[in-house]
Each structure stands twice: as structure tokens, then as C-alpha cells.
Amino acid sequence: MQRIFLIGYMGVGKTTLGKALADRTGLSFIDLDLFIEGRYRKTIRQIFEAEGEEAFREIERKALHEVAEFEDIILSTGGGTPCFFDNMTYMNRVGTTVYLKASPEALTERIALGKQSRPTVRHLDDKALHAFVRKALTHRTPYYERAHHAFDVERLVNDNDTDDAAHRLQQLLYGHGERR
């Protein structure tokens, strides 16, 4: 029975790398945000707008505990998931946590490419976005660094990079690339 939790800031590649790792290991992939959206039949943005962040974080916590009961999964968490309640302690207790780590510059570049789909940053120009990312990372990094493993995803630009990263992550988690 395995539970692998991928954590890190938005745009770091939790979903992309999680799917690639699932393909390599045969584990099921779950995106926590998509799980919540399916359960509540609302987007994360709609939940935030209607309920507020505090209510969303409680929904997220409950969903995390529900999904963490599943076996043989790779779970991509929301960027803020580890930073609320006892979520990080809980994930460390019931599974293996991996902090996907990239520089503020790399994250800013990735987020800028799709910022229209991200309500919290869509209105920011590049300079303001970089400042926003730096500030958020300053707050969140102490939570992220409590993960069992830190894994560098600075270069995660194309499919070849993703395949290489999935292979390296599989080696980190299982040794010689074999499933435990």
C-alpha cells in the first residue's frame, strides 16, 4: 500500500509530473483540486468566491483525509494544502511526501504562461507576479521543507523533461526505478 503526496507551489508541475509518475509505477493519480471540484460540482474559484478561503481550506482538509484513505495513489495537492491545519503532519504520517522545488523565477515564468486560468494572479503584470510568488514562497517554504523528500523540477519545460523527471523521481522513491 502506497500513498505519495506531491506538494509545492502552483505551477511547479505537481499534476504533470504526478501523471507521468503514475504511468511509470502503475499507481492511480488523483489531483486534489479536481477531486474537490467533482465532489462539490463547483470550481475551486467558485468555492473560494462563495464560501471564502477559510471554508475552502476546511473542505480541502476533509477531502485530503478522504483521499488519503485510498491505497496505491499519487496525490497532487493544492499549493496551499500543506500550510493549513495539520495537513503536512498528516501527509507525512500516512504516506511519502515529495516537495517539488523550483526557483521563484522558473515558477513566475510558468505561471505567467497560464495566469488567465489562475484567479489569484491573473491581474498581475510580470514584475508584480514575481513579487507575489517570492512572498508566497517565503511563507510556504517552511511547510514544504517538512516533506520526506525535496525534488528539483527547475527544468520542466517539455515532455522529454517530464519523462526524465518522472524517471529520476521514481529512482528517488524506489531505488533502481522499480516499484516497491
Image (tube, rainbow, N blue to C red):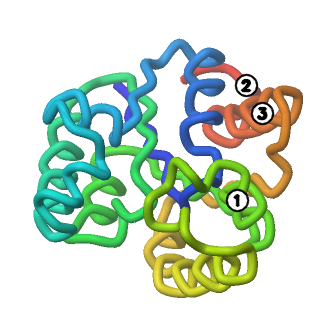
Asked if residue 125 lies left or right of residue 147, the reply is right
Q: Amino acid at mark 3?
A: Thr
Residue drawn at (80%, 27%) of the image: 163
C-alpha span from label 1 to label 3: 19 Å
Residue 168 image point, x, y percent:
78, 38
Q: Amino acid at mark 1?
A: Ala
**What residue sits right under mark 1 in the picture?**
112
Please tell me whether mark 2 or mark 3 is closer to you in this view. 3
Q: Quadrant of the N terminus?
A: top left
Residue 60 image point, x, y percent:
21, 52
Asked if residue 89 lies left or right of residue 76, the reply is left
Total marks placed: 3
Mark 1–mark 2 contact, CB under 8 Å?
no
Labelled disc at residue 17: none
**In the rendered structure, which disc, 1 or 2, sits on the residue that comes first in sequence?**
1
C-alpha span from label 2 to label 3: 15 Å
**In the rendered structure, which disc, 1 or 3, sits on the residue that comes first in sequence?**
1
Q: How many residues crowd around disc 3 within 10 Å: few (fewer than 14), some, or many (20 or more)?
A: many
SS of the residue under disc 2: loop
SS of the residue under disc 3: helix
**What residue sits right under mark 3 in the picture?**
162
Labelled disc at residue 177: 2
Asked if residue 133 lies left or right of residue 113, the reply is left
